Image (cartoon, rainbow, N blue to C red):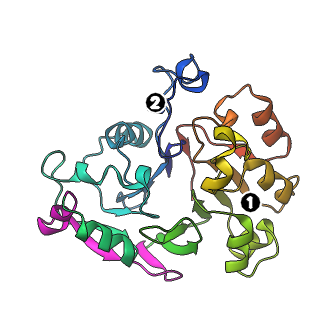
Amino acid sequence: MVLLGTAQDGGVPQAGCAKSCCMTEFGGPTRHRNPVALGLTAEDGSRHLIEASRTLADQLIIWSTVDGEPLNKLDSIWLTHGHLGHIDGLGLFGCEAWGTEDIPLHASESMIRVVQSSPPLAPLFDNNHLIPTPFYSGKRVELTADLSVTPVKVPHRDEHTDTHAFLIEGPSKRLLFLPDHDSWTETLELHSADNPLSWLHSLFVDIVLLDGTFWSGEELGGHAQKIGHPPVEETLELLGIKGPSDPRVVFIHLNHTNPLHDESSAETARVRAMGWEVARQPMSFNL
């Protein structure tokens, strides 16, 4: 499994940003961060993409470099929800670009309806570039004999579609992909859990790729608090110091303003000192 991007929907640098986080050597043209996506390569050689980013071409090159062979075929696509950076690459599968044939698009019923009702996207189904394949929360989908995905519903600004995390199970490990949710209070209440670690332990996960969009609620001039996403500062307080039986927690989906993008930042050092991790592009995980 390859992490094909680490950034929030806008990527880094982000359009319209003239601040140092996007214009310096750290955030400028030589240090691009793709929006979050995952590439799953099963033992039978099949390949499964999670999230359809506009940087798809770059992500496929990253994936093929890690795999060691060209990547010109996908066996399925999975979408967590309908926000910009997770779906704005869907059009690339159509006749104007890749022109794929009969790739199953695994998404919730509400996400399938969004594609079907969108004039620019509906031809993806009408012309059989993608095949609508609805999933249901809590229902496991076996992709191969050694790889399965179980959607897990989470609360997150569901203006157009609902939102799911994905519990991905390989031959020996389980990984939770949770790039977006609104708050720990809402997520834990939905899943009848007392705290993040008790919930993660109940899922028997070994690795968690976790929403780390904002470091604090003060980002974006304080507007981050209105957008949702639990700040990393809050998540660290809830997690505490990593224990020997705790899963790996890797923060992903970092907004362009998030100091965790910077390897040398005090915030990155704090995460690591507590035993947790910050995503880097690319990272590989063996399940």
The local secondary structure at tag 2 comes to: loop
Tell me where residue 40 appears, x and y as whole percent. Answer: 44, 56
Tell me where residue 196 appears, x and y as whole percent. Answer: 77, 66
Does residue 116 lie above or below 35 as drawn? below
- As drawn, is 112 to the left or to the right of 279? left
Residues 63 and 104: in front is 104
Residue, disc 2: 16
Query: Few, some or many C-alpha atoms within 10 Å of disc 2 (few <14, some 14-19, many ≥20)?
Result: few
Image point 50% across, 21% down: which residue?
28
Tell me where residue 262 appears, x and y as whole percent. Answer: 67, 28
Kindly tell me whether residue 105 is visible in this rendering. Answer: yes
Image point 53% across, 45% down: which residue?
8
Closer to the observer: label 2 or label 1?
2
> In the image as oriented, which residue stretches furthest toward the top?
25
What range is drawn magenta here?
120-143
Residue, disc 1: 247
- As drawn, is 95 to the left or to the right of 209? left
**Mark linked to residue 197:** none
Amino acid carrying mark 1 in the image:
Pro
- As drawn, is 42 to the left or to the right of 113? right
Amino acid carrying mark 2 in the image:
Gly
Labels in figure, total: 2
**Which label's residue is closer to the chain start, 2 or 1?**
2
Does residue 136 lie above or below 159 as drawn? below
Residues 86 and 273: in front is 86
Using the rendered view, name the quadrant where residue 274 is placed. top right
